Amino acid sequence: MDMTMKALLTGLMLILPVGLRAEKTETKTAAQPDVLVILTDQWSPRYLSWENPEVKTPNLDRMAKEGMIFDACYTTSPVCMPARISLITGLYPHNGGHSVWGNVGNYATPAEAAPMFRDIRAAGYTTAQIGKLHWSSGAAWKEHHENLEDYYQALGLDVVVDVSGPPDSADARGAYARHLRQKGLLEQVAKDLHDRYVKWEFEPRASVVGVEDYHDVFVADEAVKFIGGQPQEKPLCLVASFHSPHPPLDPPGEFATMYEPEKLTLPANVPPVYLREGHALNHAETREALAAYLGKISLVDRCVGQLIEALKKRGTWDNTLVLFTADHGEMMGAHGYLTKGRFYEESARVPLVIRWPGQVQAGRTKAPAQMMDVYPTIVEAIGGELSPGRFAVSQLPVAMGKKKAVRRVAVSEIGTVAPLRVMARDGRYKWWAEEDKEFLFDLDTDPLEMTNLAELPEHRETLQHMREEMLLHLRSSQLNLSAGYKPKVQRLREAEKKKKPKAAEPPR
């Protein structure tokens, strides 16, 4: 790594305004908890069972009833890579050491910039991520590391099973591809996935493999093996990272028919007909896509049940800190869009549930939160030390009922060309700016974001307030290499004071 980057990372300083930074919260546990992060991909909060009773997720339901549900949690960027990089770095896309505003090709997050797993391991934990990583792509890690194992160790990871998703090539490598090859299924899966991606990944059609060989179940099986193989005397931190409900819309087995499309309800912000990638979709076709999407959601819930049972067998479920979230959401027809990459609630807002028996209160909160806040929340809960210069903030004080909020706003950022797009959400309003337009929504009265208030004179003050909140956030979350600098005169005076002998004590 060049000296500029080293200096940048060494000089990271957190300069949040008063009221934005969380104080350390005292916890009283006899032993450090095990930690389980359930990280999903492209899960819209519109399709959480506690927001939509049509969704069938009994395992997550039970977990959420025991924990704190964050109804205003947002991704730092509504696409995979920048969101996942924020999680392990604790930085926003606009920060040096991150600087990824969209999905990129051959890239690897610098290990020095991503201290999450090192901070957790330093507190005495065995660390693991099993499933989708996507904070790197290609072989860019070779620039600074001899092999992948060296890169993972530099990140602070003891165990890694990288399952990037279903393979669309018979030449695919990796643990899941080996599993499919051993079962004689790789060529069949690769052809099916290739055809879906070329034709249209939103075509709802069952997977060519059964439930037992589906990639999310493979991830859950590997995670269960990891949990079962860990010594009782040492706590573990596992990030179980599932590819679903990300397209293709290919739920396996019974999950492909679990939901009847005609019985599903679409939000009022889904147009009767809309055009996406040359496909004209009506409500009936959108419901078919939604049924497959929900099938994948219920499959993930089944996998969550496997993890819960493994932790119960380990004997630590009653002292396990669980955090359930997603990298970003899915539009699923809202406002005439599919996939992600937008600041509407369906895409930018993400699930966040924190469960820790005896510590975290059960309930719901509208406190602004960021998905990357998972990182410092874990570190505080386990009694660790957070690396300096992080802009992620622990949500533990909110989850424990000790504070109403630790952030003024939650923000999101995305873009590949200037001007880059930014979004801010406080307790009630959401504002964002695109290349040539501003948006303002009152989420209390208009949760489906049907009425843009930005151009209405009576909301001019609110518009200006949200602009100022964004400006304050940007001013407060910049890397500051001059922070802590002392002028030469001050340094000399301090040095002289240290030289002066102490006055002798008078005789007694």
Image (tube, helix red, strand yellow):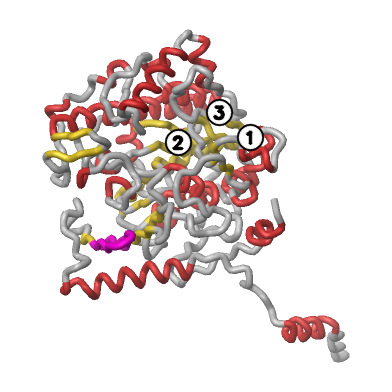
**Where does the magenta region start and end?**
425-440
The amino acid beneath tag 1 is Asp
Q: Nearer the viewer, residue 316 or 249?
A: 249
Question: For the residue labelled by badge 1, is the local secondary structure a helix, a strand or a loop?
Answer: loop
The image shows residue 247, relative to residue 418, as above or below, that is above
Say whether residue 439 is magenta: yes
Reply yes or no: does residue 37 show up in magenta.
no
- Residue under pointer 2: 318
Query: How busy is the neighbourhood of tag 1: few (under 14 within 10 Å), some, or many (20 plus)?
Result: some
Residue at the image point whose x is 15% and y is 32% from the top = 264
Return the residue at label 1. 158
Dot 3, how many residues are within 10 Å of its Cα: few (below 14), some (14-19), or many (20+)? some
Is the residue 233 above or below the residue 27 in the image? Answer: above
Task: Specify the quadrant that holds the C terminus.
Answer: bottom right
Q: Quadrant of residue 64?
A: top left
Q: Nearer the viewer, mark 1 or mark 3?
A: 3
Residue under label 3, please give it: 161
Side of 51 relative to 211 (left or right): left
